[in-house]
Image (cartoon, rainbow, N blue to C red):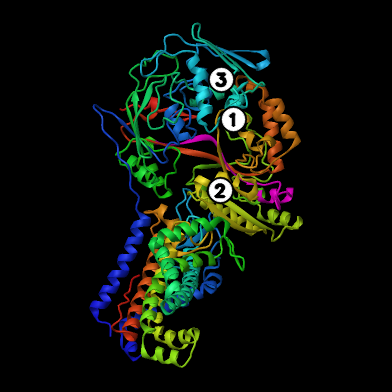
């Protein structure tokens, strides 16, 4: 902890990430009290006062207004006359929510299956390792797009629970599945090594069962790796979510996400460049801040670790 | 502690990842054109590749644009802009047919001395062969043939070796077509490029990459699927071959450029000659084009409509008040802006330019060029007890259709429904909403005329068009008044439409009152050329768009 506190760069980027999260959480407050509009409210034929003049929110030929730097349309409007600043904050909430849930899914699957495969070896390891290889073999974006598109219309019914199309849990589920082998494989390797250590042998000699050993002996020794992986997965999940949403396989319209905002804005370049710059910059800042902070955490917890800032 | 190099490396890695992401999603390539000698060729850009350049298969506007000047049928359309272009003229037939037997028998005589682009003589039996080939290959609109020509359905099902309703005599050039029942627009059906003649013996397989010879001012060569093809002047075509069909002026290179921004910029900068009228000019370029290239840009009205279908068999739109509320609440000016200003707000189903469009009737649910009556719409929803009723809005992913759906969903929520969106890929959109098992409540619908007869549009509201899959009547309208009028007006030949225009107008006013659809308006399209093209001489055809045979270089 002391090492991390001495790393001012990592702390600064960590603070930036916290600030972004905080701003996104305040989206409803901003929408209600500052912009006076919701994220999906269209204002196509309305006008807004800019410098004492009434200006079309969307021009008769379809070009939206740029940043007014005032409460309403602070960062401009999109082609549907929606407030970009409001959608940016709500989009951030969606992106972060998806990234958070996806990371949870990835970590749970990876810890469970990686530890099982590494400790149990034999048939468990054989089957699970091939499963990791199978998912790993597909490029993450390609697999995410394939799953996202397949589930976007009909959702998924897993018996115990159903994910409807349009639910934010759907892209979170897809991203969580796509990334889990990237964490499970290193954890399995560590578990494989740990199971041969003396303290595990000692526990085994004392008659402790495999489940107890995994929980009490193996898992605590995987903690530093897990902590290092969490921010990395979050950063990559944010990026993949943006990519999937851009391609129509992630967050479904009209819900905003930084990816859908980029997709909406790309056809209006160069006349309404703010539509891609605003979500693009937000995406860069968020991913950068998580990545730099993650490196700081890794250096603090495990200076000799081989886990690097990219998956 | 993390050093500066470490930070630098991490920042580099992150930016690298982001740049890769942006490169993957943000950049589109564009096609290129080949060159030819002299002033030509003319470089035409196309946003979407034709579904096929084989006349027996192609059924999209992109395909027809190329094939209608390559494959002439017994009749064709006059090469003219505006209403004059809807006039049917004899093609490979000497004259328009003699119609007997109460409108069920059409008799043509083949024009003498015609040859295909490969020099082979044209025979009467080639017509029967072309129709059989289109059915065998599965032309997208083959039902126009199989449902009307006697024996065509049996041929399609493999129960007959040939179509019994088509009789030809190569010696005299006589062609007789027997219909199952009188069908008013039958001559329009024969004007489709799919009914254009091809030599007997042309393989009964897709020749989209090596199109067969045809009768017309151009032939299609050098097809690179989804990339480019060339329209080459037919060496065996003389300008007097068929009166009314001009010889082309220049060879044409067609390139597929899916990025409409890139397309518009190329034409604006004169590095390509013709913008695809099927594509939308990005809003941010329209004002630039209007100021810098006003002498080579025009908005051309088309006989096409943009609608939202309202499924009368599914709640909440099985309630007339719900449908009326949507029509009151729709802000057509908003949709006009979303369509880069290329939409004429309207309320009637039949577009301007289609016989039967009500010209002086008031719109039943408010003036389309005024702000919508949201208060009235909310009141109707409340009266119907439908506040909070769930509605799924279906739409395609292509701009600006997705933006239309975003607006429409927002409006439905504003007037009291609880609406969510379902966006599907454009290629699968109509198949998805046309599958009755999906119970699509409402969604986007765009329709352009296949031929200038209101019956073409009214198939979208014809109860006989309701099918379990590939359903065309998305509102599932089964209205006895509409059915009886269609039965009565359907057999009237296109050439006699003027005599029944008031009845079509009355029917269209009735349809608007029933609010079976929410009509957004009628689309305008860009006629946009480079400085090299003689803009004034170029024909914008009401059925087939830019008439490439009229393109000439200055």
Q: Percent position (x, y) of residue B135?
A: 54, 27
Discs 3/1, front? 3
User: At 72% across and 56% down in the image, what residue appears?
Assistant: B381
The chain under label 1 reads: B
Q: In the image shown, does A212 or B110 lie closer to the viewer?
A: A212
The N terminus of chain B lies in quadrant: bottom left
Q: Is residue B390 above or below residue B219?
A: below
Magenta stretch bounds: B297-326
Q: Element at badge 3? A: loop
Report if residue A286 is visible in the image: no
The C terminus of chain B lies in quadrant: top left
Q: Provide the residue designation for mark 2.
A: B333
For label 1, count other residues whose C-alpha is less than 10 Å away and answer few (under 14), some (14-19) or many (20+): some
Discs 2/1, front? 1
The chain under label 2 reads: B
| Residue B379 located left or right of residue B283 | right
Report if residue B148 is visible in the image: yes
Q: Provide the residue designation for mark 3.
A: B162
Q: Earlier in the sequence, mark 3 or mark 1?
A: 1
Q: Earlier in the sequence, mark 2 or mark 1?
A: 1
Labels 3 and 2 in the same subunit:
yes
Please tell me whether residue B299 belongs to the stretch shown in magenta: yes
Q: Provide the residue designation for mark 1.
A: B143
Q: Is residue B269 above or below residue A37?
A: above
The answer for how far apart the CA atoms under marks 3 and 1 are is: 17 Å
Q: Percent position (x, y) of residue B198?
A: 44, 21
| Residue B495 located left or right of residue A98 | right
The chain under label 3 reads: B
């Amino acid at each position: 902890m002391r090492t991390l506190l001495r790393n001012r760069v990592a702390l600064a980027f960590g603070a930036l990430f916290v600030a972004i999260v905080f701003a996104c959480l305040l989206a409803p407050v901003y929408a209600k009290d500052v912009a006076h509009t919701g994220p999906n409210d269209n204002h196509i034929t309305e006008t807004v006062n800019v410098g004492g003049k009434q200006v079309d929110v969307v021009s008769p030929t379809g070009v939206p207004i740029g940043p007014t730097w005032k409460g309403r349309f602070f960062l401009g409007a999109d082609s549907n006359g929606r407030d970009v600043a409001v959608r940016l904050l709500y989009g951030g909430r969606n992106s972060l929510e998806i990234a958070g849930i996806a990371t949870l899914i990835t970590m749970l699957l990876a810890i469970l299956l990686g530890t099982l495969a590494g400790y149990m070896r034999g048939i468990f390891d054989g089957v699970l390792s091939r499963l990791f290889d199978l998912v790993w073999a597909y490029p993450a974006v390609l697999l995410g797009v394939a799953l996202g598109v397949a589930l976007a219309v009909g959702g998924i019914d897993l018996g115990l629970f159903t994910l409807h199309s349009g639910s934010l849990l759907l892209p979170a589920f897809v991203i969580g599945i796509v990334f889990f082998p990237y964490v499970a494989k290193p954890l399995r390797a560590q578990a494989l090594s740990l199971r041969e250590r003396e303290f595990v042998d000692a526990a085994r000699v004392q008659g402790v069962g495999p489940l107890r050993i995994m929980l009490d002996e193996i898992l605590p020794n995987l903690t530093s790796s897990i902590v290092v992986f969490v921010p990395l997965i979050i950063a990559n999940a944010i990026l993949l979510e943006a990519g999937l949403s851009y391609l129509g396989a992630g967050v479904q319209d009209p819900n905003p996400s930084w990816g859908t905002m980029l997709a909406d804005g790309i056809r209006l370049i160069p006349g309404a460049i703010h539509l891609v710059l605003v979500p693009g910059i937000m995406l860069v800042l968020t991913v950068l801040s998580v990545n730099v902070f993650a490196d700081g955490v890794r250096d603090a917890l495990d200076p000799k670790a081989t886990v690097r800032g990219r998956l | 502690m993390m050093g500066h190099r470490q930070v630098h490396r991490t920042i580099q890695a992150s930016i690298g990842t982001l740049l890769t992401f942006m490169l993957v999603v943000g950049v589109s390539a564009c096609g290129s054109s080949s060159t030819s000698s002299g002033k030509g060729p003319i470089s035409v850009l196309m946003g979407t590749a034709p579904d096929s350049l084989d006349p027996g298969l192609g059924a999209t506007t992109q395909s027809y644009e190329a094939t209608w000047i390559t494959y002439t049928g017994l009749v064709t359309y006059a090469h003219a802009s505006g209403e004059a272009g809807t006039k049917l003229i004899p093609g490979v037939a000497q004259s328009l047919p003699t119609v007997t037997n109460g409108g069920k028998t059409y008799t043509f005589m083949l024009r003498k001395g015609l040859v295909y682009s490969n020099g082979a003589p044209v025979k009467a039996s080639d017509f029967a062969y072309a129709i059989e080939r289109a059915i065998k290959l599965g032309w997208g609109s083959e039902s126009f043939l199989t449902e009307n020509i006697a024996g065509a359905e049996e041929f399609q099902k493999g129960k007959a070796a040939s179509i019994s309703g088509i009789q030809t005599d190569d010696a005299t050039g006589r062609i007789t077509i027997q219909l199952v029942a009188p069908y008013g627009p039958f001559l329009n059906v024969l004007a489709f490029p799919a009914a254009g003649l091809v030599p007997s013996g042309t393989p009964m397989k897709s020749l989209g990459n090596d199109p067969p010879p045809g009768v017309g001012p151009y032939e299609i060569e050098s097809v690179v699927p989804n990339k480019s093809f060339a329209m080459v002047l037919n060496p065996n075509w003389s300008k007097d071959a068929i009166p009314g069909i001009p010889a082309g002026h220049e060879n044409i290179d067609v390139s597929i450029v899916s990025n409409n921004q890139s397309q518009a910029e190329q034409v604006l900068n004169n590095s390509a000659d013709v913008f695809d009228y099927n594509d939308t000019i990005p809003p941010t370029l329209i004002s630039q084009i209007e100021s810098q290239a006003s002498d080579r840009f025009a908005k051309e009205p088309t006989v096409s409509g943009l609608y939202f279908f309202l499924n009368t068999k599914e709640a909440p739109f099985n309630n007339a008040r719900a449908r009326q509320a949507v029509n009151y609440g729709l802000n057509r000016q908003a949709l006009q802006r979303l369509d880069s200003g290329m939409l004429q707000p309207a309320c009637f189903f039949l577009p301007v330019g289609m016989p039967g469009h009500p010209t002086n009737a008031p719109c039943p649910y408010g003036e389309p060029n005024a702000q919508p009556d949201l208060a009235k719409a909310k009141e109707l929803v409340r009266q119907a007890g439908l506040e909070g009723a769930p509605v799924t809005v279906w739409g395609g992913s292509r701009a600006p259709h997705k933006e239309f759906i975003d607006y429409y969903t927002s409006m439905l929520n504003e007037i009291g429904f609880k609406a969510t969106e379902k966006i599907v890929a454009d290629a699968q959109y109509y198949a998805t909403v046309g599958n009755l098992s999906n119970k699509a409540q409402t969604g986007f619908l765009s329709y352009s005329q296949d031929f200038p007869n209101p019956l073409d549009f009214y198939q979208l509201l014809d109860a006989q068009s309701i099918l379990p899959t590939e359903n065309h009547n998305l509102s599932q309208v089964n209205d006895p008044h509409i059915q009886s009028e269609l039965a009565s007006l359907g057999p009237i030949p296109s050439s006699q439409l003027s005599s029944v225009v008031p009845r079509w107008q009355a029917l269209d006013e009735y349809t608007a009152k029933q609010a079976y659809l929410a009509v957004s308006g009628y689309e305008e399209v860009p006629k946009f050329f480079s400085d090299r093209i003689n803009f004034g001489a170029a024909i914008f055809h009401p059925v087939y768009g830019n008439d490439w045979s009229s393109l000439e270089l200055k």
